[in-house]
Amino acid sequence: MILLTVLFVCIISTYSASVKGHTTGPSLNNDKLYKFDYSAEVYIDSVKAPLKKSAGYRFSSGVDVNLLWRNPENDDDQLVKITIRDVQVETVSERPADKNIFKGKSTEKILGKDNLQALQRPIVVELARGKVRNFYSYQNEPAFTQNIKRGLASLFQLQLHSGSAPEVDISGKCDTTYNVRQDQVTKIKALDSCESERHGFTSHNPILDVSSKSTSATTYLLEDSFIKSAKAEENYAFVLNARRKTGAKIVSKQRLELKSVQAGPGLIAGKQVAGVVKTLDSSYVAVSLVAEPVKSECKKCPSLSEHWKSIREHMYPEKLSNAEAVRSFLSFIKNIRKATKEEILQILKSENKEVLPQMMDAVTSAQTPESLEAVLDFLDFKDASTSILQERFLYACGFASHPSEMLLKSLTDKFKGDIANEEIRETVVIVMGALIRKLCERDGCKLPAVLEAKRMILNRLEKPKKDDNVKMYLLALKNALLPEAIPLLLKYAELEEGPISNLAATALQRYNPSFLTKEVKETMNRIYHQTRRVHEKTVRTTAAAIILNSNPSYMEVKNILLSIGELPLEMSKYMLAMIQDILHFEMPSSKTVRQVLKDMRTHNYDRFSKTGSSSAYSGYIIRGPDVTSTYSLDILYSGSGILRRSNLNINIFDRKHELQASQVVIEAQGLESIIAATPDEGEENLDSFAGMSAILFDVQIRPVTFFQGYGDLMSKMLSATGDSMNVVKGLILLTDYLQEIQLQSGPSANVEFLGGLAIDISGGMEFSLWYRESKTNVKNRVATFLSGNIEVDSFFAKSGVETTLEVETALDFISTVQFSQYPFLVCMQMDRVGTPLRHYVTKYESLPSGRRYTARAGKTALLAGNEYPLHQENSNMCNQVFGAKSESSSNWF
């Protein structure tokens, strides 16, 4: 009985709806003309700025709407004519006449006579159940005026019952939700879901990227089953993830308000929509309601060569520490992205050797098919004399923000061909590893070029030939971080010797702990505890770091702690410092370490009073609301007091992500013969060697060698000038964000954030047998510049806001060792110079005639210089070192 009652109610409801009609969409009355006032406003400004001073414009007009035809068989199928009239354009903010670019200009002059006429030609819309089924307009109409009409037509699209469904409008196909309460309808459009063909890309690492948030809501008031008023608002906000105070927003508003209803033309007779439309005007054609792309040509923009000439003076090597160099670099990239292959080749061939490397950085960073083809045509890898340019090209490829499969395939092909310089050959493979990782992280691991490159690298390590350079393939894997490469890295770490074993271990150290399986930890434990064979202490300490950083068990931590005291002197001190650093810096394994230390067999004076010069320490560079930056510095010495390895890391974190901003490692071995000391266990047969390895923004750079072999060492000691050796120098594109946005009111917006870095990392190692002293010095010189630009191109006017951020700084790490006495005196210093941080916001509006309004505001904050704290023992040592130096200098006479 209940079932029959429910069924009866449903039948009655359905019948009532069919009798009443027009229940699913708005309905127009016959022979009536509806007169509306319409306005569309666009505001562009900083994220938290009030709208009253924003850049932008207001488009206003009258709108006439009348019913042309109603389907005789379905009252919910209607053909509606919409006509725009009395168009006005003005600034969106109140400002003095001399700052109002629209003041004194008629609408015809602003829009152009042809555009105004096109805009006022009517459109015809077929509404079926409240949705736009067909949109009729004129075929050759300008895309911009057509988009304004599309934006207006989209306002007439609504349904009169609550629910969610995909809906096609000017923005594309979007998930849309309706909430209906009596005569009020609210339409919420999920802008993130909109499907449309829009060009754009994001930065590789989320910390360097831009976050966006968008909302769209339209509120309708209905009267007599038709629209009385409609208010729509879209909001887009874009902020830098690393500094959320830096960003910009777009607010787009539409208002449609019914002013009067008058007697209008009658209906057109007909059974089919197409016939009725042709009767009205044979020139009408059905076009998509989705917006057309609008591209305005820049009539006064400089050519690529002219632009290069204007910035060339900032691109000399000695000026790369200035933020202006980075600004010029970024602006040049934007211009290159619009250039043809021939234009790019022309400027490459016209430049000299001094500034050509900087040009190479920019051309490669543009990452367009045209720029890649131009560079590959320009560079000859068979010519060793251009190795500097080849290296700059390769490193720019490694730092690519959104690399393509074409780029990886090009490098693979180059590697298979002839390369004159062996160091360049190594760099090609190392950079291929970085590209593999970036493409895999963007779901490109199964691309043909990626599969080919992975197979080549893995095969060369699985079955190496006698003349194969195993190091370069391991360095490639250190960049690629392929899960399938872990078994290979374990084999090389445990079974090989010297640099090969160490390199494989440090490659494993770069993996996320989630990839470090039980097999990995078992192998690392065998290496550290030397279960099967003797290992160098650099490999053993790396193995220990991997264990302690991968959720170690109670027994793993206990065994490491029990080993302290049984190890060589400096290694014991180093491991003790590592444990203390874990505790004071509250690293993930600190809880387990504290549990183990409750046992007096592991936590006793004998174990925790070990002396030596080795150390490990971590600290904060910045602790901000958006990101946190940390530094860690660990130094391992040989038993004879000579530096074995120093490792300086700078990492950046946010709530979800991590970025290894830089790592500089200086390694030395086999130097005991200099001071007639005895080598440590397992290191008796090591060749004399010193070199530097760097990781920059998650990309491993090809290591450089200070000297190799005793003869080379003595030669360089006798001819030493104290000059540093360059590791990385150049311009790097870090933030690279571009999105095209279609506003519902008609215009489109371009959102572009570009951030770059000019960097110079150099390092050196000095020995003085006379003073019995060694010194390592790592210098980091950095200039950064970021520009965020949001521009709404309305064809007749451009409005936008640009926000810039710039800083120049330097970070030095100096380690001084005096081995004239025992125990040795070791002093470490890490200093950052004071530097200004400049932030500017520029709002602008312009007309094609050249009339322009600009408002600029800026702020400068001083980042004070800082000597970063290390452990107290280091401070005491530094006092002794510099005290001893001052005493010796005072005793000269």
Image (cartoon, rainbow, N blue to C red):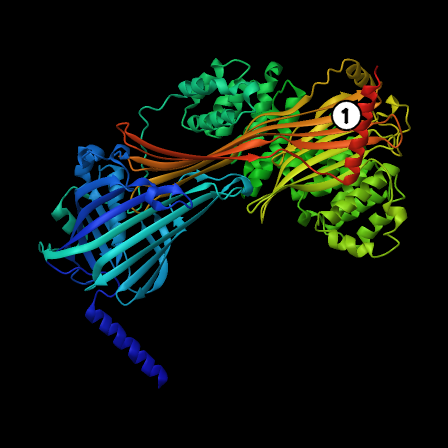
Determine if residue 134 is in view.
Answer: yes
The percent position of residue 39, horizontal first and vertical second, equals 24, 47
Q: Is residue 260 above or below residue 361?
A: below
Front in this rendered view, residue 250 or 512: 250
Residue sitting at x 70%, y 49%: 587
Q: Secondary structure at mark 1?
A: strand
The percent position of residue 708, horizontal first and vertical second, equals 78, 21
In the picture, measured across the screen, residue 849 lies left or right of residue 648, that is left
Residue 436 appears in which quarter of the rendering?
Answer: top right
Give the labeled residue for mark 1. Answer: 775
Determine if residue 468 is in view.
Answer: no
Front in this rendered view, residue 359 or 421: 359
Q: Quadrant of the N terminus?
A: bottom left
Residue 713 appears in which quarter of the rendering?
Answer: top right
The percent position of residue 19, horizontal first and vertical second, equals 19, 71
The number of numbered discs placed on residues in the rendered structure image is 1
Front in this rendered view, residue 384 or 350: 350
In the picture, measured across the screen, residue 18 lies left or right of residue 583, that is left
Q: Which residue of the protein is positioned furthest toward the bottom in this rendering? A: 1
The percent position of residue 196, horizontal first and vertical second, equals 37, 45
Residue 389 appears in which quarter of the rendering?
Answer: top right
Residue sitting at x 13%, y 44%: 281
Q: Quadrant of the C terminus?
A: top right
In the picture, measured across the screen, residue 637 lies left or right of residue 788, that is right
Q: Amino acid at mark 1?
A: Lys
Q: Is residue 74 above or below residue 627?
A: below
Mark 1 surroundings: few (<14), some (14-19) or many (≥20) residues within 10 A: some
In the picture, measured across the screen, residue 302 lies left or right of residue 553, that is left
